[in-house]
Image (cartoon, rainbow, N blue to C red):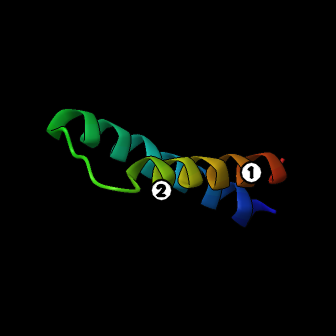
Amino acid sequence: MKLNRNLGTLLLGIWLVLTGLISLIDLRFSGLGTIMSVLALVAGLLIVVGR
């Protein structure tokens, strides 16, 4: 269970860093929204399941 929570927290951290970088450098490409949404969903699920 602890692995799920740590992995969820790691993915959440990656999502936050990428969100900040996307805003700072105005990064845009096809599918970016989908990738970020899936990353956020997986991170959230792992954190909730880890509790």
Residue 25 lies in quadrant: top left
Measured from the top left, where is residue 16 in percent x and y? 42, 40
Q: Is residue 51 left or right of residue 40?
A: right
Mark 2 burial class by Cα count in 10 Å: few <14, some 14-19, many 20+? few
Measured from the top left, where is residue 27 in percent x and y? 21, 45
Give 35 or 9, whichever is nearer the viewer: 35
The amino acid type of the residue labelled 2 equals Ile
Residue found at the far left of this picture:
25
Measured from the top left, where is residue 29 in percent x and y? 28, 54
Element class at badge 1? helix
**Real-space Cα separation, disc 1 to disc 2, in angstroms:** 15 Å
Mark closer to the chain start, 1 or 2: 2
Q: Is residue 19 left or right of residue 48?
A: left
Instruction: From the image, tell me which residue sits under label 1.
Output: 45
Residue found at the far front of this picture:
30
Measured from the top left, where is residue 21 in percent x and y? 25, 42
Element class at badge 2? helix
Residue drawn 70% across the image and 66% down it: 3
Residue drawn 34% across the image and 56% down it: 30
Q: Is residue 36 left or right of residue 28?
A: right
Instruction: From the image, tell me which residue sits under label 2.
Output: 35
